[in-house]
Each structure stands twice: as C-alpha cells, then as structure tokens.
Image (spheres, rainbow, N blue to C red):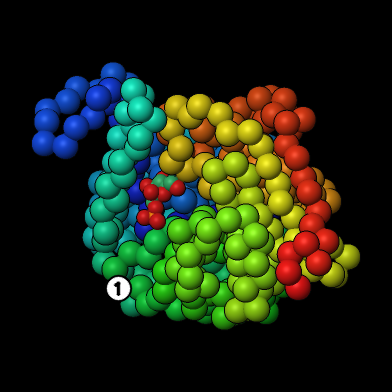
Amino acid sequence: MIITVTLNAAIDKSLSVPNFRLGRRHRTVEQRTAAGGKGVNIARALKTLGQPVIATGFAGGPTGTRIVDQLTEESILNDFVRIREESRTNTAVYDPTNGQQTEINERGPAVSPKELELFRDKLLYLARGADMVVMAGSLPRGVDADVYAGLVRELRKAGVLTIIDTDGEPLRHAVRAEPDVISPNVIEAEELVGHEFNDDEDHVIAVGEMIEQGAREAIMTLADGCVACVRVDGQLQRFRVLIAPREAVAGVGAGDAFLAGYVASRYGGRSTADCLAYGVACGAESTQHLGAGLVDPREVDRLLSEVDVQALSASAVGD
Ligand SMILES: O=P(O)(O)OC[C@@]1(O)O[C@H](CO)[C@@H](O)[C@@H]1O
C-alpha cells in the first residue's frame, strides 16, 4: 500500500481563460473543479495507474467535506482528519492563447496541536500496512516547519519508505531527517541548495548537493524531464532523463504526475532507470489535461518510447 499525505488539501479550480489580462473581467471557456493539493493529485494519478493508495491529511469545513466527497466519488480511498477550520480553495488560470498560467493558492486553515496529534496517530496507524508514504505540498498554519522531518524519522523506524515533495523551510528540515527520496522542481531546488542554476551541469551538481544535505536520493523535475542522483545496487548514480517538450493544455500538477509515475514504478519493483522514465512520461502526459493528477495510462505507455534515459559517469558530473 502507498499512502499520500496532503496536510494543506484544497479544492482546485482550473480555469481556461483566453487573453487573460490583469484588471479585466473575463469569462471562462472551460473549467474544472476537483479535490487537490499535491498529495491528493499524486493519489489520483496512482489510482489511475492501478496502484493501491490511501490519501490522508487534513480536511475542514464544507470545503473539506467536498474534498473528501470528491475523492470518494473518484473511488480514491481516503482517511482524513477532520479539522475545525475551513480547507482552502486554489485557483489556476490557463491562457490558451499564450500558454501562460497563473496560480493563486490560499494559505489554508490553522491546525490545532490536538488535530496535529490526531493526524500523527492516524498516519502511524495507516503506515503499519504501508510500504511507502509520499508527503507533498505546503503546510497549513499552526504546523511547525519540521513536521515532515519528524514524520520521516518515525516512519523510518516503522520501516516505511519516505518520499517528500515540498519547498522552503519544511523541505530544508525534511532533508536533514534523511528521507528516502526528495523531488523538488528547479525553483524549490535552487532555494534548498542556496544558489541559482545556469545550465544542465548545475542541475547535475545540485542533485549531489541535496544528497550531501541528507536526502538518500534526489530527483529534480524539469520542463523536459528530470535530473536524478539515486542508488543503483547501493551506489549513487546520476541520471539525466529527457523528453521533447510538448504544447501543454495546462502544466499545474506535472510534478505530481511525475512523482506518481515514479512511485508506481518503484512500487512495482522496476529498475531505477525504468522508474525515472515512467515518471517523466507521466509528467509529460499530464500536461495534456486541464486539472492536476490526470494521466492517461495508454498515452503514458506510448510516450515511454520517446523518453531518453542517460546514466551519467562520475567524471561527467564533476565529482
Ligand atoms: O500550496 P501547495 O500545497 O504547495 O500547492 C498546492 C497546489 O497548487 O499544488 C497542486 C499542483 O501541484 C495543486 O493541486 C494545488 O492547489
């Protein structure tokens, strides 16, 4: 079983608005409303890919009820801690005329210490039947930045693989707790290692720096694939995985689809190179849908032949 954790779950509104301009009134040409937040999206994609998954986290107020109801309607197993304050709604606007997207994410509810304790107990209980826990997304108010770090330590004691996709301080703390995998995008990775990247060589060096900070494996997602420093037969190996970028319907959630593909493949016991390739194919395919966590498995299989996995030698990465 795979568990996804979304502490700051949301209702995601995805709006397609041609010629979007600040300060103007617009009408949508297409819109989609769905339960969201990164862990929820990962759970949706994992379920579509045929993997056993339970989504957990916090859900509050009528929006929280809607999140839980939507997951249940989609037959995604879920077990959320109900909280007193209202869960958030996030809005993404896509302009099909220029491919630009604008996201407005609410801060989310405040979570009390008692609610956090209930969640911790629930997660550790659920984890007894799990192989992997994916913790993804921002934190709601009232939750300390080291929450993922503490959960990583406890889950490791329980023998569960931990995968983290977050940013800022929560990521910095989590990395020190030595999670099995982290999966930041470029901006999140630059913030973590503390400098900007100019080219692919910088990306390759950066995933090594993330390992030095504590992550056991690091995968940085990019618009055209990923760069990874992962373990093959116990040895660290760096990979560059490429796919030709395609015209996107919407890009929000591509990183979530990547991680779902990677996790699905890893859960299925595939080789490291296969896991990375499958993740990249899922991320690319997800850009063809309005709404996050949506993938078409047949299209993913077709795209796999377009993915180029390059194992990099140590000398090529400046060791
Ligand atoms: O505010 P966070 O938790 O960092 O990100 C939340 C979010 O923007 O990320 C997902 C796409 O990755 C959306 O479903 C969701 O609304």
Residue 318, position as x, y percentages in the image: 73, 69
Q: Name the outermost residue toward the top.
A: 29
Q: Position of residue 19 (x, y in %)?
A: 25, 25
Query: Is the CB atom of the residue marked by disc 1 within 8 angstroms of ligand 1's nearest atom?
Result: no
Dot 1 corresponds to which residue? 142
Q: Judge by depth and name the residue closer to the eye, 40 or 123.
A: 40
Q: Total label count? A: 1
In the figure, residue 51 lies in which quadrant?
A: top right
- Find numbered disc 1 in the image and state the secondary structure of the residue it sits on: loop
The residue closer to the viewer here, 189 or 162, is 189
CA neighbours of label 1 inside 10 A, class few (<14), some (14 to 19), many (20+): few
Left or right, 170 with reference to 13: right
Q: Residue at x 37, y 77 (%)?
A: 144
Residue 235, quarter of the rendered image = bottom right
Q: Which of 260 and 94 lies nearest the eye of the viewer?
A: 94
Could you tell me which residue is drawn at 34 percent across and 23 percent down? 97
Q: In which quarter of the image is residue 6?
A: bottom left
Q: Looking at the image, is 263 positioned above or below residue 17?
A: below
Residue at the spot 26% in from the left edge and 59% down from the top edge: 107
Q: In this view, does 280 lie above or below 169?
A: above
Q: In the rendered image, which quarter contains the C terminus?
A: bottom right
Where is residue 130 drawn, in percent x and y?
Answer: 67, 60
Q: Look at the picture and state if 108 lies above or below 278.
A: below
- x, y percentage for residue 315? 81, 67
Three-letter code, disc 1? Gly
- Residue drawn at 52 percent across, 72 percent down: 193
| Residue 260 appears in the figure | no
Q: Tell me: residue 209, above or below residue 78.
A: below
In the rendered structure, the answer to whether residue 46 lies left or right of residue 83 reads right
Quick check: can you spot residue 211?
A: yes
